[in-house]
Image: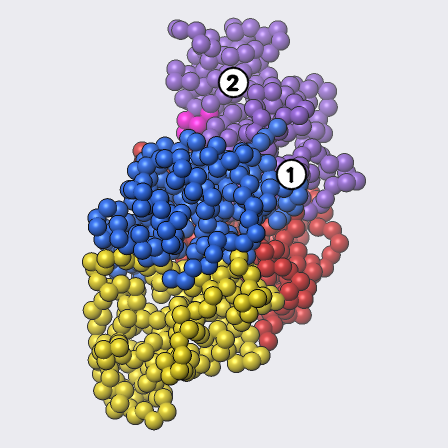
Chain colours: A yellow, B purple, C blue, D red
Amino acid sequence: MRAAAERMVGPELENRRAIAASVARDIPEGWHVNLGIGIPTLVSDLVPEGREVLIQSENGILGMGPAPDDENADPWLINAGKQTVTLLKGASLFDHATSFAMIRGGHIDLCVLGALEVAENGDLANWSTSANDTAPAVGGAMDLATGAKRIWVAMDHTTKQGKSKLVSACAYPLTAAGVVKRVYTNLGVIEVTARGFELRDTAPGVTFENVQAHTDARLYRFGVAD
Amino acid sequence: MRAAAERMVGPELENRRAIAASVARDIPEGWHVNLGIGIPTLVSDLVPEGREVLIQSENGILGMGPAPDDENADPWLINAGKQTVTLLKGASLFDHATSFAMIRGGHIDLCVLGALEVAENGDLANWSTSANDTAPAVGGAMDLATGAKRIWVAMDHTTKQGKSKLVSACAYPLTAAGVVKRVYTNLGVIEVTARGFELRDTAPGVTFENVQAHTDARLYRFGVAD
Amino acid sequence: MIEKRVATAAEALADVKNGSTVLVGGFGQIGHPMALIDGLIEQGAKDLVVVCNNAGVGRSGLPRLMYLGRVRKIVCSYPRTAAVFSELYAAGKLELEIVPQGTLVERIRAAGAGIGGFFTRTGAGTLLAGGKETREIDGLPYVFEKPLKGDVALVEAWEADRWGNLTYRGSGANFNPVMATGAVVTIAQAQRVVELGDIAPERVTTPSIFVNRVVAVPYEYPYPAIEY
Amino acid sequence: MIEKRVATAAEALADVKNGSTVLVGGFGQIGHPMALIDGLIEQGAKDLVVVCNNAGVGRSGLPRLMYLGRVRKIVCSYPRTAAVFSELYAAGKLELEIVPQGTLVERIRAAGAGIGGFFTRTGAGTLLAGGKETREIDGLPYVFEKPLKGDVALVEAWEADRWGNLTYRGSGANFNPVMATGAVVTIAQAQRVVELGDIAPERVTTPSIFVNRVVAVPYEYPYPAIEY
């Protein structure tokens, strides 16, 4: 079984892989990291060689390794995205109560999540598109968004319809208020600070003005006074 | 290391052992039982041969066996009274959080405790002799008294000064209100029912009147209407 | 002699009543007691409240129980895994209580551990806090959550013995150890039923006190992985 | 490379500050981190709040720390184990917060698990509920208890690896796994420091995420059993 992201081909996968690689480069050694479904899942395999980062899965795993070959996969060992995984030496297995004690108790250094919207005050919407959702599902999103020490979002900058996912205020129901610290998109890396979105880095060939044009909120230059 | 009770000799130990044996006879197969310090600790070795009763210790043991020889004792394995113990086949070891989940969650069928006083409404006082105790200590007494499915008390009927420990109302600070279901003493077995103390059984040579004379509350004959 | 082993799922489930709250272990297909769910389908109890992280996948197991109209309400964090759920829910034929995953397991733990309720930051300021008591603690908003107790828990284990000690394999623990503590009657289906003492005391994950009945259900492979 | 092993207790404890709340594992003499307590005595931090089920035994370890006047307050269920405690408490030189044993471990768990507080029946209607919020839930009285967080936790383990995974021996787990979760910095003394991977994933009792520093303290026998 392969993740949805891995079944993609060509530019779409490459685009997502580039976002994930950018996240992976920024994770220091020794951090405990939970990865949401979608682009965040790709981060796991892109952590630079030799750097020890402990990936946690909310269904009771700490210390996941690279994805297994189909032949060597242990069918009893799956991650939160229901893909089979491997364990590093030093990994541990535990139950949901312990797993969410880690998450809610502030022991996870970083959670990387996908999002529907991120607001300039750090509000995150990633679980529901309507208060009258026809089939709502929250999973561990709220626990992770509230409990982890820091939240980074990894997502496309805009919807397929071209609408900005970085907004001045979330229209969708919130997952958690004021939690997002940084956003990685196909256009760049945006810090969420006291004054709002600050563009820290841009993808190759992308300008500040390009990013602003695709962002539904004011964009500041990172570290540059207004 | 031997328990304090086992270091006693002669009539005192025999008296306490008789109370404990009486308790042990009444424990059905399959019950999960926590035993307090003192007379209750003696119950463990007196369960009739072949009857499977699982003794729990609040420091993380379920399924304790007979006391070890000094030579075969595992010094890392102690019970709540800090004596070394053995494990039966099928025993389990766990931490304090799990242990008190068992206790507080109502999973323990029976807890046998010592007491300073038991009141006719089932109130239990067994942790402190004064609201201004010079060195108070509660241990797990309140958790056990409140959490176990049923509480039996095993104690001498009177203090060394001859004062009844079965009373109409507790003078000492409560451990828990209305929890005691049955009391085993050197004089007999007393059920605590809606109307108060009912004498169910007497020790050899002891009469109803003897027990009433040593009880600071009205005594009823078990199952006999007033 | 204590003997919690029973011969069949049917025997283990015989006394499940209409209207019961049934805790069902598993995360995805792993640690999910399919044989007991099949047994519950056979058994016939209806008007059930099912508590499970997911709503099952495909058409067998929980989706079939729902499809047969036997489930009044489902309590879970991520029901969207089953098309049957979405159809019944959209048609107003199934009640849903959506609970964040960590709050779900903590509410069941509270029931099992004698906790009358607790405050969590999870969900504060969101739709899922609607109607709930809130409180500011050390300057941060918290939501009050109540214990969630089962009449029956159905769990899947790797090994079990006749007292009911359980171990789990891989990511198979997930909700099972907590659900085993949170119901009046806990029934375990186990891949391997072993002799008393074969599970070393420090290897026991669910101590026997939490388990009432054990059914041997050996199979060589978890239920087929299904993508969704 | 992640390396949590440090050479000495002194190094592990160097940054403990005056006024710290120190969680200390152990039940009786088992799982009680004597080498780390000795290290704390050497280190010199004072005005400490010590959280431990017992107050130690005899004159070494916690009793010595108290005797030296370094402990402002002790939080425990059964302090009466140490004569030094009783003397200092009677003389008004030591504050005491007495907490039922199950409430003590649950309050520390709450701190470690992000729970803002919880209701328990333990202690309702007793002196120990004095001044606390109470609430009737399903017709029974409950007491509100708050999380108890440590600045430092000192735990004793049987095995540890360089990531900080821990196992325990016999009844040596007791408060240690929960205390390891409930402090800003957790320091473990371990009988055996093993290679990464020597502790199989399902044998890990305290996952490495909860441990910051590991000190090897091999000895062949627990501290002498003392009767009290």
Residue visible at 39% across and 6% down?
A: B226
| For the residues bearing labels 1 and 2, Cβ distance under 8 angstroms | no
Q: Quadrant of residue D119?
A: top left
Boundaries of the magenta span:
B176-180
Q: Residues within 10 Å of mark 2 (few under 14, many from 20)?
A: many
Residue visible at 26% across and 76% down?
A: A159
Give the Cα separation between the discs numbered 1 and 2: 45 Å
Vertical relation: C171 (above or below) C177: below
The C terminus of chain A lies in quadrant: bottom left
Residue visible at 43% across and 24% down?
A: B122
Residue D133 in sight in this render = no
Q: Residues within 10 Å of mark 1 (few under 14, many from 20)?
A: some
Q: Is residue A61 magenta?
A: no
Label 1 SS? loop
Task: Give the main secondary structure, helix, strand or loop, of the magenta stretch.
Answer: loop
Measured as percent of width and height from the top left, residue C62 is found at 38, 47
Measured as percent of width and height from the top left, residue A167 is found at 23, 76
